[in-house]
């Protein structure tokens, strides 16, 4: 038997985890994750299995930035699942990140994740974000056009 967490408890657990991340405390961040948790994101074909693998991934983000902050901006909790919107801000100033040397560049982006909870721990996280945002921030990729519809007209359209 396991006690079901209330939506408020799940929301507090998510907020607490990201507050620990923003404080640079990776141990406190991963404390609320189950040892056999699973992490995947839409930008990578790799799925991480286990809290230790996830912790190693998170350490890379924390080590790369002296001021990394990720803040949940909105949460919707239903049953044992939460949909979370997050806002990230960081400066790439301390360590290589995805193989790129620190540049001092400032990154700001929003992303979303779904979180599954069981037995008081986060057991699954699926993150959704644009990898182009990270590549642009790191200088690997140029800026995408902001409004491609303004430059391309559908066939059959005239200027009148």
Image (cartoon, rainbow, N blue to C red):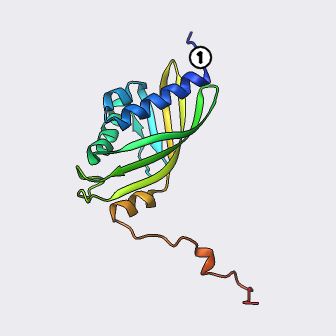
The residue positioned 30% from the left and 42% from the top of the image is: 62
Q: Is residue 94 above or below residue 2?
A: below
Q: Is residue 32 above or below residue 61?
A: above
Residue ranking furthest to the top = 1
**Residue hosting label 1:** 4
Count how many numbered circles sit on residues in the image.
1
Left of 23 or right of it: where is 15?
A: right
Q: Which of 104/100 is in front?
A: 104
Name which quarter of the figure residue 85 lies in. Answer: top right
Quadrant where the C terminus is found in the figure: bottom right
Q: Is residue 97 above or below residue 34?
A: below
Residue ranking furthest to the right = 160
The residue positioned 32% from the left and 59% from the top of the image is: 105
Residue 133 spot, x, y in % from top left = 44, 59
Residue 111 spot, x, y in % from top left = 51, 48
Left of 68 or right of it: where is 44?
A: right
Q: Which of 10/49 is in front?
A: 10
The residue positioned 74% from the left and 89% from the top of the image is: 158
Name which quarter of the figure residue 57 lies in. Answer: top left
Q: Residues within 10 Å of mark 1 (few under 14, many from 20)?
A: some
For mark 1, give the secondary structure.
loop
Name which quarter of the figure residue 26 lies in. Answer: top left
Residue 124 spot, x, y in % from top left = 49, 32
Quadrant where the N terminus is found in the figure: top right
Left of 105 or right of it: where is 85?
A: right
Q: Is residue 69 above or below residue 105?
A: above
Residue 71 spot, x, y in % from top left = 46, 40
């Amino acid at each position: 038997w396991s006690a079901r967490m209330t939506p408020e408890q799940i929301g507090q657990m998510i907020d607490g985890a990201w507050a620990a991340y923003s404080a640079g405390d990776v141990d406190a961040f991963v404390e609320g994750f189950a040892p056999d948790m699973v992490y995947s994101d839409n930008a990578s074909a790799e799925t991480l299995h286990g809290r230790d693998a996830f912790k190693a991934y998170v350490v890379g983000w924390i080590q790369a930035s002296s001021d990394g902050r990720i803040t949940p901006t909105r949460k919707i909790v239903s049953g044992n699942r939460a949909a979370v919107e997050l806002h990230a801000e960081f400066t790439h100033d301390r360590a290589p990140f995805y193989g790129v040397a620190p540049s001092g560049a400032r990154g700001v982006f929003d992303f979303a994740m779904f979180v599954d909870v069981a037995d008081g721990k986060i057991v699954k996280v699926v993150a959704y974000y644009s990898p182009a945002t990270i590549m642009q921030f790191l200088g690997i990729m140029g800026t995408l056009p902001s409004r491609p519809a303004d430059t391309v007209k559908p066939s059959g359209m005239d200027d009148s």
